[in-house]
């Protein structure tokens, strides 16, 4: 699964840079070619997510595939969008059944449900939408100001933040933003004192520091996370999943630096 996620991250960055006429490592990019490759990868990701396997991984594949289709198409591809919705409905239904006895599914299930309901109307009475809102409310209610979540380590806390923040800006609901801001401060403090940081934490940290909305933007922290992931990847052969992971974040940061930050400057 990691390879699919890294490939999707790379193609999203390449497509953005191609649209703006920005080169990558001295090579002029072609937006049409990037879009074509993205559709091929999208189809492969849906095929993989449609297979029986770990529900958490299937949900993460669907979330990544949704972002890939959204970020690399100028015109809505209704056929692929409908295929995504149909598969997401089936996999989230499985996730809802498993989540009763598997609380760790909360984050990937909520991320996928947010993408699903963002594209559908009149869903307030659906069991999936109720689960999404109830889970976010439970996280907000169990958060202790200045201390955090008693039932969550740092990785789980940052993952919850990512879900809560995305729901906030996708559904224009700022009711939990105070919790998000306080939790971001706590996570930042804990990241500074960790003797070692896993790639999982670095990926979450990069995402939180580039999301915006209720999560404060910290470009220096994001650049540091991307650099550390790239250095990690460089320790492995160029055909490995680890190398591709590092490469994807190096490119994601370069894309952000040349697009988002250049506009700000």
Image (cartoon, rainbow, N blue to C red):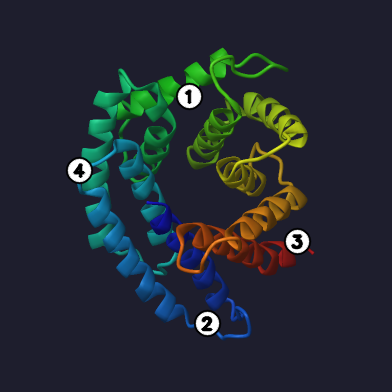
Element marked by disc 2: loop
Residue 38 in the image: state x and y as whole percent.
38, 68
**Image quadrant where one finds the C terminus:** bottom right
Element marked by disc 3: helix
User: Between disc 4 and disc 2, whose residue precedes?
Assistant: 2
Q: Which residue is mark 3?
A: 264
Which residue in the rendered view is the most extreme toward the right? 265
Q: Residue at x 37, y 55 (%)?
A: 65
* Residue 213 appears left or right of 138: right
User: Between disc 3 and disc 2, whose residue precedes?
Assistant: 2
Which mark is nearer the camera, 2 or 1?
2
Q: Residue at x 69, y 65 (%)?
A: 257
User: Between disc 3 and disc 1, whose residue precedes?
Assistant: 1
State how far apart marks 4 and 1 are (Cα). Answer: 28 Å
Which mark is nearer the camera, 3 or 2?
2
Q: Which mark is residue 52?
A: 4
State how far apart marks 3 and 2 are (Cα). Answer: 23 Å
Pointers 3 and 1 in contact (CB under 8 A)?
A: no
Which mark is nearer the camera, 4 or 2?
4
Q: Which residue is mark 2?
A: 29
Element marked by disc 1: helix
Q: Which mark is residue 136?
A: 1
Within-10-Å neighbours for mark 4: few <14, some 14–19, many 20+: few
Q: Is residue 126 visible?
A: no
Which mark is nearer the camera, 3 or 4?
4
Residue 70 in the image: state x and y as whole percent.
41, 59
In the rendered image, which quarter is residue 208 located in? Answer: top right
39 is higher (above) or lower (below) than 84? below
User: Between disc 2 and disc 1, whose residue precedes?
Assistant: 2
136 is higher (above) or lower (below) than 111? above
């Amino acid at each position: 699964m990691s390879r699919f996620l890294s490939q999707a991250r790379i193609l999203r960055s390449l497509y953005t840079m191609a649209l703006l006429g920005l080169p990558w490592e001295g090579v002029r990019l072609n937006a049409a070619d990037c879009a074509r490759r993205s559709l091929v990868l999208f189809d492969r990701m849906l095929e993989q997510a449609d297979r029986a396997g770990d529900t958490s991984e299937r949900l993460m594949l669907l979330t990544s595939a949704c972002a890939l289709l959204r970020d690399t198409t100028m015109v809505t591809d209704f056929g692929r969008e409908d295929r995504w919705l149909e598969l997401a409905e089936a996999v989230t239904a499985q996730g809802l059944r498993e989540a009763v006895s598997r609380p760790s599914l909360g984050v990937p299930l909520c991320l996928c449900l947010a993408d699903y309901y963002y594209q559908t109307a009149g869903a307030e009475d659906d069991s999936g939408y109720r689960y999404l809102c109830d889970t976010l409310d439970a996280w907000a209610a169990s958060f202790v100001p200045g201390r955090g979540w008693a039932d969550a380590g740092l990785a789980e806390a940052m993952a919850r933040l990512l879900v809560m923040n995305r729901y906030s800006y996708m559904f224009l609901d700022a009711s939990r933003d105070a919790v998000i801001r306080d939790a971001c401060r706590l996570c930042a403090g804990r990241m500074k004192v960790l003797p070692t940081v896993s790639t999982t934490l670095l990926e979450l940290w990069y995402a939180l520091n580039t999301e915006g909305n209720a999560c404060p933007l910290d470009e220096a922290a994001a650049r540091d996370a991307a650099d550390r992931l790239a250095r990690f990847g460089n320790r492995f052969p160029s055909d490995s999943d680890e190398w591709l992971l590092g490469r994807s974040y190096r490119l994601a940061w370069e894309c952000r630096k040349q697009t988002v930050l250049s506009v700000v400057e």
